[in-house]
Image: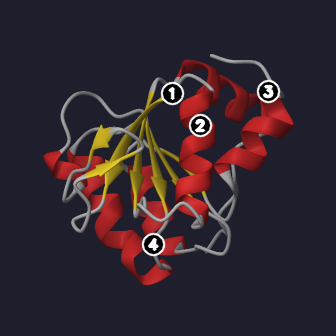
Amino acid sequence: MKMFQNPTDEQLVDLLKNAKTIAVVGLSEDVTKPSYEVSKYIQSQGYEVVPVNPNADVVLGRKAHPSLTETEGPIDIVNVFRRSHEVAAIVEQAIQIKAKAIWTQLQIVDEEAAQRAQEAGLTVIMDRCLKIEHRRLLGKEKI
């Protein structure tokens, strides 16, 4: 079985430059949590942030949704702040809503879910921080 490979820097730049809407699964209202910090950063970079959290009403000024399947409009990237064992179900929802990419944060890995997402045509980024990668690849460039 081949091990999962993240996209090249060039592919990541292309994805980040063409993405407009990023759904954040597990986006917390708690300003001290990484999900909030990362989402606030990506929002400041010009992306539309769609919070996905069944326990929140509004995060970062945006209406929160209980699940990915209840979001409206096209989602380019699904950014995952949930435990690894929850990724497979999130991938299924991402496929269902026809997201372009699924991005799991640091230390969130599920090889089988990644393979399933890739087979369904999604770009998969695992075990990487969206904020760190955006800064590294695009610096202060806003989309």
The answer to whether the residue labelled 1 contacts the one labelled 4, judged by CB atoms less than 8 Å apart, is no
Q: Quadrant of residue 8?
A: top right
Q: Which mark is residue 97?
A: none
The structure residue drawn at horizontal position 22% and vertical position 28%, both measured from the top left corner, is 73
Mark 1, residue position: 47
The structure residue drawn at horizontal position 24% and vertical position 68%, both measured from the top left corner, is 55
Tag 1's secondary structure? loop
The answer to whether the residue labelled 3 contacts the one labelled 2, judged by CB atoms less than 8 Å apart, is no
- Could you tell which of marks 1 and 4 lies nearer the N-terminus? 1
Q: Amino acid at mark 1?
A: Tyr
Instruction: Point out the frontmost of discs 3 and 1.
Output: 1
How far apart, in angstroms, are the residues tagged by discs 4 and 3?
26 Å
Mark 3, residue position: 138
Q: How many marks?
A: 4
How far apart, in angstroms, are the residues tagged by discs 3 and 2?
12 Å
Q: Nearer the viewer, residue 1 or 69?
A: 69
Q: Amino acid at mark 2?
A: Ile
The answer to whether the residue labelled 4 contacts the one labelled 3, judged by CB atoms less than 8 Å apart, is no
Q: Quadrant of residue 5?
A: bottom right
Categorize mark 3 by other alpha carbons within 10 Å: few (<14), some (14-19), many (20+). some
